[in-house]
Image (spheres, rainbow, N blue to C red):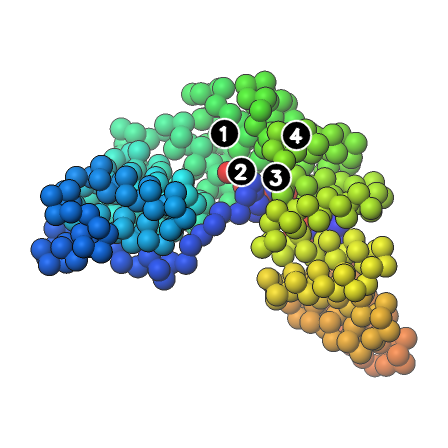
Amino acid sequence: MLRIALLVLFLLFPHTLPLVASSHAWQVRASGSAQTTGAQQTAENRSGVSHQSAKDPRQWTELVTTLFQNGSAQQAVITAQDALRSIPDNSQLAVTLATICLYYQQIQPARHFLEDALELAPGDPETRVLLARVSLLAGDSNEALAVLSDMPASAKDRPDELLLMGEALALTGNLDAAASKLDSALKISPTDVPSLTTYAWVLQLQGHYRKALPVLGQAAEIDPKLASIPYRMAVSYYFLQRYAKAEKSCEKALALDAHDAAAYFMLAMTRVREGNVARAENDLRKAVALRPDVPLFHRELGKVLLRGANLSEAGTELDHSLKLDSADAENYFWRAQLSLKQAEKQRALSELNQAIALDPNYSAAYVELAHLYTQAGQRREAAQVVARQRQRQIHAPIRNSEEDRQLLSPPH
């Protein structure tokens, strides 16, 4: 089950999970030449830009950058919106403001500004490629494909377009088409590291872990300081059950980037497979400290603590994970294991039933639930659980797991 749980740190994560700002705060859009003079004056007054400077894009971009640098992200985005009201027909200004927002991890505003730019200059391939990239960061692979499909004929089959098409196709499950796009990108630009690492990612999604290694080795020769390369090597080694090599690759990734939460998680999962629970616990604590917003990290730390009989802290971590993701069936299964250790059988029964409700194909939960009902003398309920499992024809003890999806998160 742990092995399953590991395809998320490479499919979902990555290097990270983008910080997507709430779209509600960014609904005011640049409205082009239809803005009234009064509205433009209001924008200028609110942002502190003089009337004389209001038509100077440089003044606006400097102000937006300064606000971001001072930690005023929301005001920076409002000021960027004001800039586009004052200069409504400047697509390059919209692109510049989007790029600034993207640098400061304001994904949703960047997306809106690029959409505005594309409306003004629909034939600009650079804007279209950047919007597709931002759409992927926002988790919208279908929009990325739609944006790229409208690329002008003269700009099609550029390496950067093929790279993004490959990633978007992979995220929609079309792995063969994704591999084909990336293969085409590498024929045009065989030393492009992003194309190499993304191609290796697609190979891993296809289960070709061994084939991915020489591709990653080629990328490492070109850019030996990129932490994501040894990390992805660790993913291949993990699924090939070469845990010593996986551990060494994780350590190399962390030597290049000591703040890589994904690498700490990968290292922890490797050490769990090696039976080194104490060191795995330490690695998971580091992952949680770096990314306390990831429910999976809290859950896996709770599981490790449970194995070490640290029941109180295990419960705290599992509960924290549930607050972040209340629909995690695996969490309820492990909460049930904790409840059993605390002699709370009725609570364990409830938690196992909840796990099955959330994931009707969760084989281990059926087995555990039937066993508990039998122990409690509730044979009719036990028989019903077994019948439900047989009706769904669930036989495999291993299911698609969140950990596996995490390990196979897209490259960014």
Determine the CA span between mark 1 and mark 2.
8 Å
Would you name the residue on which mark 4 appears? Answer: 255
Query: Quarter of the image holding residue 326?
Result: bottom right
Q: Residues within 10 Å of mark 1 (few under 14, many from 20)?
A: some
Residue 194 is labelled as 1
Q: Residue at x 51, y 45 (%)?
A: 171
Disc nearer the start of the sequence (2/4): 4
Query: Quarter of the image holding residue 175?
Result: top right
Q: Which mark is nearer the camera, 2 or 3?
A: 3
Q: Position of residue 232 (x, y in %)?
A: 63, 33
Q: Position of residue 99 (x, y in %)?
A: 34, 39
Would you name the residue on which mark 3 appears? Answer: 260
Determine the secondary structure under disc 4.
Answer: helix
Determine the CA span between mark 4 and mark 1.
21 Å
Disc nearer the start of the sequence (4/3): 4
Disc nearer the start of the sequence (1/2): 1
Would you name the residue on which mark 2 appears? Answer: 411
Q: Residue at x 43, y 45 (%)?
A: 105
Q: Is residue 185 left or right of residue 276?
A: left
Q: Which mark is nearer the camera, 4 or 1?
A: 4
Query: Quarter of the image holding residue 89?
Result: top left
Q: Position of residue 112 (x, y in %)?
A: 31, 50
